[in-house]
Image (cartoon, rainbow, N blue to C red):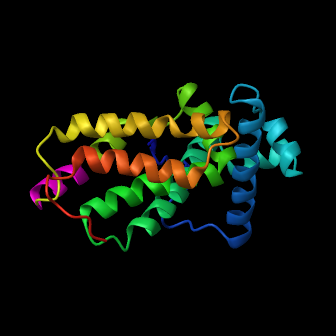
């Protein structure tokens, strides 16, 4: 599950809040960038192409973003924030670590199914050396698995090794969903969650919400 390094734009500071119009314009540009990268790839996603999709001039993009690196950093940050929010909403009501694990897996699968352009863009950014960090995701998953062990819900295993395995399975989700049009996202999410539940659950522990 890719995690994104949030890059704070160089021209932004806490004592220089942006106006509503500036925030709206930046959001419009970021959205156009996501769609452009998803359609033509990272290398061909020039300011000119992004501007044409947004219906603005390329110079206006340069006014809001110092360069492509800053724009791509914002694109990655926005996708991360939206993904984390969607997954967090699913996991918020979990009453156990097993339920939380299932929610995280299900939330990621459903986010991928519902946000194809964002995931294509994220993959392109990662493939071209953009600000996507994998180890952060592995570390957070390992932390959750370790907590589950400490609370007696998960059996003994290497949290990092299991996190690496889970992360690899999550990274395969977009490719499976997008390459096979008949894939049922809900069934896929349930089967993947059940697979890892069986892998981590302590013997004799009954599932609880």
Residue at image location 72% in from the left, 52% down from the top:
31
Residue at 61% from the left image edge and 40% from the top image edge: 177
Spot occupied by residue 208 in the image (x, y as percentages of width and height):
27, 69
Residue 147 lies within the magenta run: yes
Residue 78 in sight from this viewpoint: no
Q: Is residue 25 visible?
A: yes
- Residue extending furthest front? 204
Q: Quadrant of the N terminus?
A: top left
On screen, residue 28 above or below 123 = below
**Residue 89 on image: x %, y %:** 46, 69
Please state the total of marks drawn on the protein image. 0
Q: Nearer the viewer, residue 91 or 76?
A: 91
The picture places residue 42, in percent across and down from the top left corner, at 68, 30
Query: Would you say 38 lies left or right of 74 here?
Result: right
Rendered image quadrant of residue 119: top right
Q: Which portion, as a residue range, is magenta? A: 143-151
Q: Residue at x 14, y 40 (%)?
A: 157
Q: In which quarter of the view is residue 3 placed?
A: top left
Residue 22 is a magenta residue: no
Q: Quadrant of the C terminus?
A: bottom left
In this view, 62 is above or below 39: below
């Amino acid at each position: 599950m890719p995690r994104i390094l949030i890059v704070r734009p160089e021209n932004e500071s806490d004592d220089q809040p942006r106006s509503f119009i500036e925030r709206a314009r930046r959001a419009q540009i970021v959205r156009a960038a996501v769609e452009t990268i998803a359609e033509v790839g990272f290398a061909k996603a020039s300011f000119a192409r992004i501007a044409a999709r947004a219906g603005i001039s390329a110079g206006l993009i340069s006014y809001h973003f110092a360069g492509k690196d800053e724009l791509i950093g914002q694109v990655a940050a926005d996708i991360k924030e939206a993904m984390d929010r969607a997954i967090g909403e699913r996991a918020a009501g979990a009453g156990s670590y097993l339920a939380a694990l299932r929610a995280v897996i299900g939330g990621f699968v459903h986010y991928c199914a519902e946000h194809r352009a964002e995931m294509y863009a994220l993959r392109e950014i990662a493939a071209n050396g953009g600000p996507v960090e994998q180890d952060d995701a592995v570390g957070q998953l390992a932390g959750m698995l370790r907590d589950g062990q400490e609370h007696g819900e998960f059996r003994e295993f290497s949290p990092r090794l299991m996190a690496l395995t889970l992360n690899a399975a999550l990274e395969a989700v977009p490719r499976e969903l997008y390459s096979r049009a008949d894939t049922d996202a809900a069934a896929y999410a349930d089967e993947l969650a059940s697979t890892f539940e069986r892998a981590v659950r302590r013997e004799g522990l009954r599932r609880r919400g």
